[in-house]
Amino acid sequence: MIQGRKNVYTVGQVNTYIKNMFAQDFLLHRVCVKGEVSNCKYHTSGHIYFTLKDAAGTISGVMFAGNRRGLAFRMKEGDRVVVTGSIEVYERDGKYQLYAKEITLDGEGDLYLRYEALKHELEEMGMFAQEYKKPIPRYVKRVGIVTAPTGAAIQDIRNIASRRNPYVQLILYPALVQGDGAAESIVNGIHALDLLGVDVMIVGRGGGSIEDLWAFNEEIVARAIFECETPVISAVGHETDTTIADYVADLRAPTPSAAAELAVYDVERLMQDIASCENRLNRLMKNQAVLTKNRLLSYAARLKVLSPEYQLNSKKQYAAELEDRLGRTMRDVLNQKRHRMELLARNMDGLSPLKKLSQGFSFVSDMEGKNLSGVDQVETGDHIKIQMTNGCLEATVDKKEEFRRNIHE
């Protein structure tokens, strides 16, 4: 009878368990392994795949593109190297491999360990902290340089500085940058230029092996840079070279040429910026002048309207207009009245006694002026007055004759 199986795991579960075991071993988080390089392949993605071997065995390794700064040379088949990194399990394939962070040629391994130890010590002391970094002045007059008096570094700095701003003064402290006494010479140069009061200081040299650059990994150099009152730009080696001085300095330049560009402002660009600012300032001033002029004109117009003289003139003009309107109105009314009077006069003229008299009619009255409209109002012998156009007659009634009215009237 077949017994039931217990504790059966999937392949993925086993690989995950092994990966976690590796992860819990802190020794494997940072380990240095030396051996000979084989099967070295530079992938198009930037990753480097290789095998590290010695007489006893092999181990697969990979350096991802993000860690390429930790490789200062082009690795090839047969190189004897020291690889610093971590050993982890690639869960999908169930294989462990070495994930490289930094790779140095064999023989540099002891130096690299010293480098890492000092770096860790100084970092814990806070000498790399950003809050201690001094800003690099934008416009400098004097630049101090601590480097060898001969070599490509000083020539590159001079060429770049003279091209960007020939008016900046370069002060060179000729220091040893390699070999015995180099670290002390660099420290002396830093102290001397700091006492001289330069605006910014460039400390560096051209590229080389880790042994050539070792003076810039010494603690006394790091402390001299950290304690320096003058802002320091480190420019050691090529872009891939990184020294303790780079971490302590206020600013790291990848090359001496780049350090000159960071330290010396471009005077031509400055003049262009000044011209641009001048043009912008002129435009703003013109615009402001136009706005101010328009505002003043507006105020002047308002002041003119509100002034007593303007108000008085306006009132005078208004009074004159009222006077004209009154005159026109009065003339219109008079004309209307005159026209009506003429009509009434014509009507009155038609009813005027004088008009009748002039037409041959007469006005007859008694001696007291009472109108006599019929013969029945007088008697024979009565005195009467007859009013004519050009005079008056007095007469005595000798005879009267009364006309009979038409019975149809």
Image: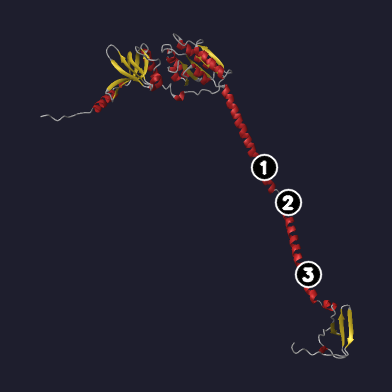
Q: Could you tell which of marks 1 and 3 lies nearer the N-terminus?
A: 1
Q: CA distance from mark 1 to mark 2?
A: 21 Å
Query: Which of the numbered marks, if any, corresponds to residue 28?
Result: none
- Residue at (46% x, 23% y) in the render: 132
Q: Is residue 95 visible?
A: yes
Where is residue 135 drawn, in percent x and y?
50, 24
Farthest residue toward the top? Answer: 180
| Mark in front: 1 vs 3 | 3
In this image, 101 relative to 380: left or right?
left
Q: CA distance from mark 3 to mark 2?
A: 43 Å
Where is residue 179 drawn, in percent x and y?
44, 9
Q: Is residue 228 visible?
A: no
Q: Give the residue type at disc 2.
A: Asn
Q: Quadrant of residue 329?
A: bottom right
Mark 2 is surrounded, within 10 Å at the Cα level, by few (under 14), some (14 to 19) or many (20 or more) other residues, namely: few
Eyeballing the image, is 360 above or below 318? below
Eyeballing the image, is 165 above or below 283? above
Q: Secondary structure at mark 3?
A: helix
Q: Could you tell which of marks 3 and 2 lies nearer the N-terminus?
A: 2
Query: Which of the numbered marks, if any, corresponds to residue 297?
Result: 1
In this image, 125 relative to 263: left or right?
left
Q: Give the residue type at disc 3.
A: Glu
Query: Which of the numbered marks, if any, corresponds to residue 313?
Result: 2
Q: CA distance from mark 1 to mark 3?
A: 60 Å
Eyeballing the image, is 270 above or below 213? below
In this image, 357 relative to 407: left or right?
right
Mark 1 is surrounded, within 10 Å at the Cα level, by few (under 14), some (14 to 19) or many (20 or more) other residues, namely: few
Residue located beneath label 3 in the image: 342
